[in-house]
Image: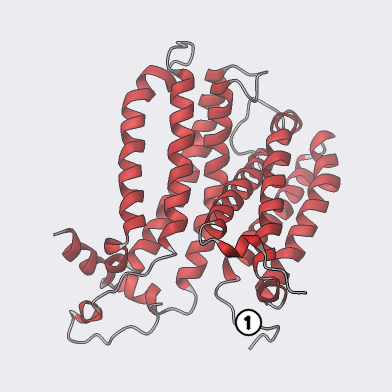
Amino acid sequence: MFIENPLNTSAWTFPILEVLHISGFAIAIGTVALVDFRLLGLGLREQTAGQLTKDTSAATLISLSVALFSGLLLYSTDPDKFYLNVSFLFKITCLLLAIVFHYTIHRRVVLADSSPALGRLVAVVSIALWVGVVFGGIFIEFVKPGLGFD
Amino acid sequence: MLLSLAIWLQNTGLFRFLRESDHGYEILLALHVSSIALFAATVVMTDLRLLGWALRGHSMQSIIDQMRVPKRIGFLCVATFGFLMFGIKAEEYYYNIFFRTKVVLFLLVAVHALIFRPRVYNRAAAHAGVKLAAGCSLVLWLAIVCAGRGIGYIHPPVFSHHFAMHADYQTPTGLK
């Protein structure tokens, strides 16, 4: 039996979810970026990267949860459009890598106050993965539908 | 006057080049949104500290002072990419109600800075108005995100002959 997704019955749900999604990932990625820039020796020099990540991890987790749940709801409004979209698949790959990287390697290196070179490497990988997520998300609207690269 | 300025802007060489490039607008949009992440984190963490909801192990002044440089760098990036996007579709955006709303909200941000910077952000030990300043700031920036996203939802009709003010110039193909 076909069941209408209640999210598709109002013109306002999608834009409102989008704003929640944007605000969520902006704060999540931004707080991670603050730690990454500290690892690169930029900004917020009064704390170590380890102290900074302890101070911001709650904000990161809460806003990441908002972004993930609003993202799932956005996805549910038109799954066919998204899972057959090259940019979306690129985004989700980057997202999974970014989350796993953030809560394993990134976290360990930051909390252990490892060598500056290792810290810089981890920071660059982290920023690249998260920016990859943003680029993948933006380009969903601009690539041709389907999995062909054309 | 503003309209002719917008039309002049979008017909300058830089913006003609960006408009006709393959993915210029989309790449600028992605860079704009990436920079928003950095800028938003500095704004939100500062305001959450002023509200007393985060970073309570540090003094307000320490957080405000330390966030100032990354906040300015973030804003510079967001504003630069945003301006380049505006220039590509300046005439269309002139008519876009969400864009106009966003401009008004930026004027309110300037008013917020004029009121609260000398009284709160430059001396956070003075407690009066601290939470009001942080709350207003969060509401304003959230409204700017809403207005910014709204811009992409509507496409006012533009008078495409304005693109061809220069005799040597063909109607652009890149305008979506």
Pinpoint residue B46: horizontal percent, then vertical percent: 54, 29
Q: Is residue B142 above or below residue B175?
A: above
Which residue is the extreme one toward the left?
Answer: B1
User: Which residue is more in the foreground, A51 or A63?
Assistant: A63
Q: Residue at x 35, y 20 (%)?
A: B118
Q: Which residue is mark 1?
A: A145
User: In this orientation, does residue B43 appear?
Assistant: yes
Is residue A13 left or right of B135 when viewed as pictured? right
Q: Is residue B167 above or below residue B52?
A: below
User: Which residue is more in the foreground, A115 or B146?
Assistant: B146
Pinpoint residue B75: horizontal percent, then vertical percent: 45, 44
Secondary element at image label 1: loop
Q: Amino acid at mark 1?
A: Pro
For residue B157, which quarter of the picture?
Answer: bottom left
Q: Residue at x 35, y 43 (%)?
A: B105
For residue B48, which quarter of the picture?
Answer: top right
Pinpoint residue B127: horizontal percent, then vertical percent: 47, 11
User: Which residue is more in the foreground, B61 or A137?
Assistant: A137
Name the subunit of mark 1. Answer: A
Q: Quadrant of the N terminus of chain B?
A: bottom left
Is residue B147 left or right of A106 when viewed as pictured? left
Q: Quadrant of the C terminus of chain B?
A: bottom left
User: In this orientation, does residue A128 appear?
Assistant: no
